[in-house]
Amino acid sequence: MGVSLSSERNWPDICLHDHYVSIFPAATAAAAGSSAPVAAVPSAVALLADLVDAGALRVHDGRLWLAARHVPVDALGGWILRWLDAEPRHRRVGTWLALLAPRAHGQVARRLTAAGVVRPRTVRRRLLTTAVVHVPTDMNRAAWAWARLTVRLQRGEPLPAFEARLGGLCLVTGLDDFVLTGLPPASRRHLHRETAARLPAEITELFTIARHRLDGAAHRRR
């Protein structure tokens, strides 16, 4: 399998995982210190979703398959594809979410920090401990796609492909409450309808597996 690297993308064309990491601290400001463990699996699933959308990965029957053709990806995507290629016996989506989760959020955050999109900030947690979160350097820029998603939901408009993916990621992570703040109940129903109708089958399968994994983790913490 060959992996070629593309140049860095401009913000409007930025990847799903970049949008998630850049806005996540703002969405969870009430519990900022908990962002790292909460963000781990969603960041991993966003990275895999970007590779599926790029045509570099396929999802079928709970497994990941590498594309047979050369697909341009960025350096982070190339790292994941090379890792997958080196582990042909391990193909379950859940396995790779577990493997990527401890690294995914930090990898994306470091890249966005280097690009000046986010900056690290130390916050206090409970029991006198601290944690590092990554906050946007320009909140308007970071919230661009999320604001557009909110407006479309408020108006009951169809969701284009990228907004449908953002909406699906919201439902996976529980950020739907953040995006839907102040909107009528009809907006939530619209989000569910649009993501169900517009997400490709492979992305839906990926999101569903991630949702089950997060639900299981939440149940174990109780």
Image: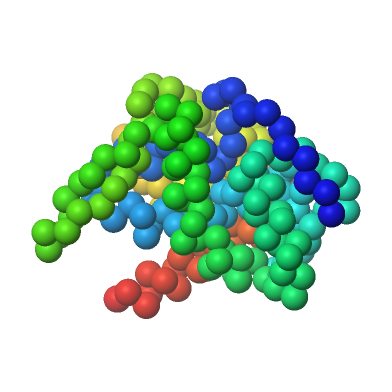
Relative placement, left or right, of 67 versus 174 is: right
Image height of 22 relative to 10, above or below: below
Residue at image location 42% in from the left, 35% down from the top: 113
Give the image location of residue 221, x and y in percent. 32, 74
The quadrant holding residue 162 is top right
Q: Tell me if I can see residue 39 in this picture.
A: yes
Furthest toward the right, the residue is 69
Quarter of the N terminus within the rendering = bottom right
Relative placement, left or right, of 173 versus 129 is: right
Relative placement, left or right, of 185 versus 205 is: left
Q: Nearer the viewer, residue 48 or 106?
A: 106
Residue at image location 39% in from the left, 33% down from the top: 118
Residue at image location 55% in from the left, 66% down from the top: 99
Give the image location of residue 86, x and y in percent. 73, 65
Image height of 194 relative to 79, above or below: above
Q: Tell me if I can see residue 166 in this picture.
A: no
Relative placement, left or right, of 59 versus 125 is: right
The quadrant holding residue 120 is top left
Tell me which colouring the rendered structure shows. rainbow
Residue at image location 50% in from the left, 38% down from the top: 111
Total of numbered circles in the picture? 0
Give the image location of residue 106, x and y in percent. 44, 50
The quadrant holding residue 209 is bottom right
Give the image location of residue 179, x and y in percent. 40, 38
Quarter of the C terminus within the rendering = bottom left
